[in-house]
Image (cartoon, rainbow, N blue to C red):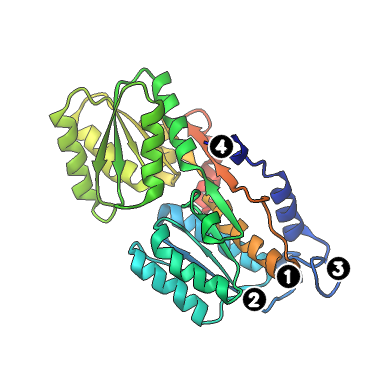
Amino acid sequence: MNARRWLVLVAVVTVVGAACTGDGGGDGGGGDLGGGGDGVSQRDYNISMVIHSDPSGTYWGVVKIGAEDAARDLGISLDIQGSEDPAKMADLVESAIASGADGIALTFAAPDAMAGPVSQALAEGIPVVGLDSGIEDWQAAGAIGFVGQDEYIAGRGVGERLNEEGLTKVICAIHEVANIALDDRCRGIEDTFGGEVVRLQIEFADPVGSQATIKSALEADPEIDAIVTLNPDMATESALPAIQEVGRDVALATFDLGPDVLTALDAGDMLFAVDAQPYLQGYLPVLMLVLNLENLNTIGGGLPILTGPGFVTTENAGTVAELVEAGTR
């Protein structure tokens, strides 16, 4: 993995700060981005965000809050929609184009499905920013930037932490079929973990069935001593109950945060959670699109803006608990 991807966010954070706390100035250009509260200058921009999930729930709800906060701070209109079906997601992007979107932020979880709609957007002069998924694909598609976590690097970090715990056999539980980001997470674990990694397909829409699947896997193989879920709800609603039912010592870790994950960490029922900072993944693409539309700015210099991985453990869970409850972490 190219080391140049470790992009420092200082410049972006500086721009965000200016957008949220600026003292106004001028009638146009880049001098009046944001201002917050009642002083926000309204812009005649319509930004669409299309993601590979319903824009609610533990993870995507935080992305939505970030995007909505950016829209409010910048005084623009925002529409957020999503679908787990790549074909429906492509339809949503095409609908955004047809409805006159000035800029589009989207996930590249299924890059082949996005190729046509993104090409159409670019042909009509609509800038596109990628987020969350598709760190290997956004640039080739023609997006002006990408905000997210390098899932492979995050997976490598997980594998290294599992090694430190002395674990030997881990389930990597995949809750969505054909999502390249989830594959990258498991692949990163496989490339660093010193023991064996078993990929297990579970179903996000069926937590009870997923619990049964995980329980069966644990009962069938007593050598499994760890589970990594790739979604916080799968950790607390499926994996943790399965471990408790089996009644043996199995370590649990997950990607992404949520109130129940923080509770489990605080109770010592989980080792750690990977924090990709989804609030930033919602906020920054909206900001980047407005800056591009208003001032032809691009951010990142051809590199992705990395928002993770960070790791939340029992030791530091309390410091982010209130923010998780507020929906911004």
Callout 3: SS: loop
* Whether residue 129 is situated above or below residue 43 in the rendered picture: above
The percent position of residue 97, horizontal first and vertical second, equals 51, 77
Q: Could you tell me if the residues under marks 2 and 3 are in contact, i.e. CB atoms within 8 Å?
A: no
Residue 296: in sight, yes or no? yes
Residue in front for this viewpoint, 270 or 116: 116
* Whether residue 104 is situated above or below residue 162 in the rendered picture: below
- The span from disc 3 to disc 1 (Cα, nearest Å) is 14 Å
Q: Which residue is mark 1?
A: 294
Callout 4: SS: loop
> Is 280 displayed left or right of 260 in the figure?
right
Amino acid type, mark 1: Glu
> Is 164 displayed left or right of 173 in the figure?
right
Mark 1 or mark 4, which is nearer to you? 4
- The span from disc 1 to disc 4 (Cα, nearest Å) is 32 Å
Amino acid type, mark 3: Gly
Q: Residue at x 33, y 21 (%)?
A: 167
Question: If you read the primary sequence from the N terminus, does the residue marked by circle 4 or circle 3 appear first?
Answer: 4
Amino acid type, mark 2: Tyr
Callout 1: SS: helix
Q: Could you tell me if the residues under marks 2 and 1 are in contact, i.e. CB atoms within 8 Å?
A: yes
Q: Could you tell me if the residues under marks 4 and 2 are in contact, i.e. CB atoms within 8 Å?
A: no
Q: Which residue is mark 4?
A: 2
Which circle marks residue 25 in the picture? 3
The percent position of residue 12, horizontal first and vertical second, equals 69, 50
Amino acid type, mark 4: Asn
Q: Quadrant of residue 23?
A: bottom right
Mark 4 or mark 2, which is nearer to you? 4
Mark 4 or mark 3, which is nearer to you? 4
